[in-house]
Image (tube, helix red, strand yellow):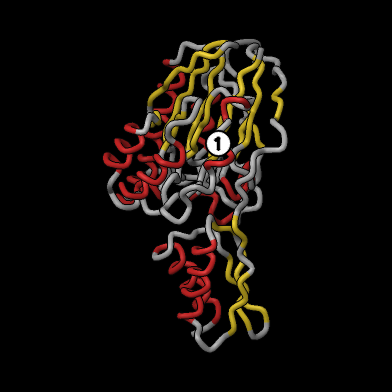
Amino acid sequence: MKDEYLLARLQRVLAEDGSELGIDVVRHDEEYVLTGEVESEQRRLDVERRVAEHVPEVRVRNEIRITRVNKPVEPEQLAPRVPVNGGEGA
Amino acid sequence: MSIRVAAVGDVHIDADVVGRYRPALDDLGEHADVLLLAGDLTRHGTVAEAGCVAREFGGLDVPVIAVLGNHDYHSDEVPGVTKTLQDAGITVLEGEGTMVTTSAGRLGVAGAKGFGGGFAGRCATAFGEPEMKAFVEHSEASAAKLAKALADLECDVRIALTHYAPVPDTLSGEPLEIYPFLGSYLLGEAIDAVRTQLAIHGHAHAGCERGMTPGGVRVRNVAHPVIRQAYSVFVLDEAC
């Protein structure tokens, strides 16, 4: 199967079977590189496993990150805005 | 006096995530007056996953207001998902508004999931196959519900909460080809129809945080992979 179709199929598998829509799969030389963010280590490994199952002959490099859940450093201050169009319409 | 709004979306909670957010949430009342959840609360939209969301985001010391996202519809268990969240004290909006009284004034939040369709000049139209008409009509109906919910709010500060994006600004970083699946200008038009101070959405994991509607309403994409923290806080002056 041509790489383009295989990559398309992989992304559908990840979305439809694994519910992971934000993962990029890119072929670099002799390996597939996975990037994106997920919510847990288990999901990071699940994505790698699913991809490896579909391309057992190619090495998979997992660069997926787990999204941080720390408190925000500072709030965003939203300054008062001047109404436009002279009135109620925002 | 100011109103402090915490928000996050696309948390995709399942059993493997329970407990991750909680340490950042336990003293939320010190930092915010309300927490908004911008959809995709679950992975597959099951009642069991909603139970995990309820454990993670229920029982906080501030009101929690949510809309559902496309993931939350995946298993066709929306009534059960909604009830599970409501039983945990989370307000779930779909074409409705709710009010929160704060020391700085009455905050009104109108929410709807929204849908895709694309943006002005490059959008889908209700023409041709029934499937295409159904796609566009769902988007139109969701935007109309949001518009009515916003207009019905009588409050000092008005916020629109959706899962899908109301503007293309906050999609920057996503492939242009998928913009029509990420949001609709009809949502932006609904937000601009009444005086709205802030629009919060999620869904676009590879997008960016900040945008603005054509009418000047600030738009914030709070998808968790975008904000990369447990939640963001926006401080609104009551007169803004």
Identify the residue at horizontal 35%, vertical 44% (top origin).
B51
Mark 1 is surrounded, within 10 Å at the Cα level, by few (under 14), some (14 to 19) or many (20 or more) other residues, namely many
Looking at the picture, tell me which residue is in the foreground, B29 or B195: B29
Residue A78 in the image, given as x and y percentages of width and height:
69, 24
Looking at the picture, tell me which residue is in the foreground, A57 or B233: B233
Identify the residue at horizontal 56%, vertical 41% (top origin).
B23
Residue B45 in the image, given as x and y percentages of width and height:
35, 49
Q: The C terminus of chain B is located in which quarter?
A: top right
- Where residue A32 sits, quadrant-wise, is bottom right
Residue A41 in the image, given as x and y percentages of width and height:
54, 62
Question: Going by the image, does B240 lie left or right of B23?
Answer: right
Mark yes or no: residue B30 visible.
yes
Identify the residue at horizontal 40%, vertical 31% (top origin).
B90
Which residue is labeled 1 in the image?
Answer: B25
From what the image shows, is residue A5 above or below residue A44?
A: below
Three-letter amino acid code at the position of disc 1: Leu
- Where residue A34 sits, quadrant-wise, is bottom right
Total count of labels = 1
Identify the residue at horizontal 56%, vertical 56% (top origin).
B177
